[in-house]
Image (cartoon, coloured by chain):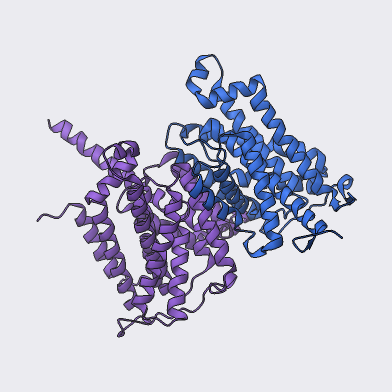
Amino acid sequence: MKLPREFIVYGVLLFITLLLPLLGAYPVFVMKVMCYALFACAFNLLIGFTGLLSFGHAAFLGGAAYAAGHALKVWGLPTELGLLFGVVAGALLGLIMGALAIRRSGIYFSMITLALAQMLYFFFLQATFTGGEDGLQSVPRGKLLGFVNLENDVTLYYVVLAIFVVSFLLIYRTVHSPFGQVLKAIRENEARATSLGYDTARFKLLAFVLSAALAGLAGATKTLVLGFATLTDAHWSTSGLVILMVLVGGMGTMLGPILGAFIVVALENKVGDIGMFLGRTTGIEWFNGLGEAVTIVIGLIFVICVMAFRRGLVGELGAWWSHRRSARAGAAS
Amino acid sequence: MTELFGLPLSALLSQLLLGLVNGSFYAILSLGLAVIFGLLNVINFAHGALYMMGAIFAWMGLTYFGINYWVMLVIAPLLVGLFGVIIERLLLRHLYKLDHLYGLLLTFGLTLLIEGFFRSFYGVSGLPYQVPEALQGATNLGFMIMPNYRGWVVVASLVVCLGTWYVIERTKLGALLRAGTENAKLTEAFGVNVPLMVTLTYGFGVALAAFAGVLAAPILQVQPLMGSNLIIVVFAVVVIGGMGSILGSIVTGLGLGVIEGFTKVFYPEASSTVVFVIMAIVLLLRPAGLFGKER
């Protein structure tokens, strides 16, 4: 059996990621990127392959982060069961929200998911198990399967990488399965998919639940890595952030969300430094406060992407590549 | 003293008034969203940020230039409307041929930009704004004590909403607007300058938001993030009411404000979520919304 060509790219990327801790990269940062990359890939399954713009994915990330944190800290469940509980929580939330939201389509779908996620946010704000404004602090990492000690950052790094790779392959398999083809048909023309006899509502709901479950896995893993779950995870700005990740990287591409997650997480961490640098070199004091106003930078990238780079970085690159190839083929004949 | 549900009637009525005040803001904002969506097919996420701009402009006018409330009630919507015209001409215009979701994404990005911009100057603490002198104090209506300013907010909002309804449903200009909503190409073929109409409609819609912002300045906290939570509730209002009818938006907005007000009395914990719960119920029973048509 011949592997598809893109697996060479995946293999190289995996190889580099395997070596990163040895090359001196800060493991927690890379793990955070991987969690958000998984979150973005899960989101891309909806926007990129089914054509549904959910504005409420923070609910699944945040909900699962709290669920896993609670299971690990309060109930003292083993790590793998804690993660599983997070995934189940994400999937259940997805089932409820999805069943309501797919009753309307298009722009209404986005507004409904946003509103339901906001409702859940207010619930988390008032509930006692979330710790309110303080969040859920000092969640123990525990031992995987009872013997792998995860308190070591490097050990945890390879566990998170394994979770990410397995999830990525699952998404790859889903997208390239007959089920994935039906999702793409719904994205292109829902009425036609219905006329072909597909129960589109069922397919959309299933895709929504799968996406929510994977977003839940991302949230649960994030709690494990950082040791805390906060309200920010469930806030609408997080839903906006994941949209930006997929938009920057490229909707409907496999690698786009990963690249987008890396760019956005790095930007969030570094924008303060960039602002300080600009403030020092230009002497304009306003730049020094740039770290306080990351939202300006994020908003600006949003506007630029929507106006000029709707295919995202990976999408533009892919388009350039196939354009070049067809130009070459034309010259050869 | 008369009692109802175990509560003094006057307390109940003052909550009703508070609910009506919030409902007025919902009504003006959802009305603006509906008018914009009708013609542009864009859900204006920036509506909340532009409402905030209206409130901050009112504060800036008073603090930096000594311009009073009444003048700013006219100037702030004009400025924000002009800003809307620029947004439409420079950015939104290029997205009409694409999927509707890009309009939502663009205005979401603009929201972050605008909020971040004002946050970098004013932080997130509330800026104080006095109730204008003429409306200070309260009136005893016999059955309740009504703070004058709250009464004014409800009356002013109703006048603006009904005025908008009258213009759209009963005048020549409104007829052109409705024709453009129904079929933009055909309307243009009859010699109507539809692109200009689209620009002005967007400007008008966001000016309405700014008007609500100025009205809100003396009673709610003026701060850069005041619009972002509000806009999500307004989205739920829009889903509940459906965007098909102007009067529907007004009635839904006011009604939900009142329900929210009563929830604050009987079960305060649910007051921030009650609108969303109603939205879920409406979606189960009548997916197209109370006044909407399935498209």
- Identify whether A105 is placed above or below A331: below
- Residue farthest to the top? B190
Identify the residue shown where x is 74% and y is 44%. B214
Where's residue A228, x and y in %? 48, 73
What colour has chain A?
Answer: purple
What colour has chain B?
Answer: blue
Identify the residue shown where x is 45% and y is 69%. A65
- Residue farthest to the left? A1
Where's residue A178, x and y in %? 22, 49
- Identify whether A139 is placed above or below A86: below
- Identify whether A166 is placed above or below B12: below
Numbered label tally: 0
Where's residue A44, x and y in %? 36, 52
Where's residue B228, x and y in %? 60, 52
Q: Is residue B93 visible?
A: yes
Q: Is residue B83 visible?
A: no
User: Relative to residue A233, is residue B76 drawn left or right?
Assistant: right
Q: Nearer the viewer, residue A316 or B152?
A: B152
Q: Nearer the viewer, residue B12 or A319?
A: B12
Identify the residue shown where x is 44% and y is 46%. A103
User: Relative to residue A4, is residue B135 drawn left or right?
Assistant: right
The quadrant of the rendering that contains the N terminus of chain B is bottom right
- Identify whether A122 is placed above or below A99: below
User: Relative to residue A12, is residue B32 drawn left or right?
Assistant: right
User: Which image quadrant is residue A192 in?
Assistant: top left
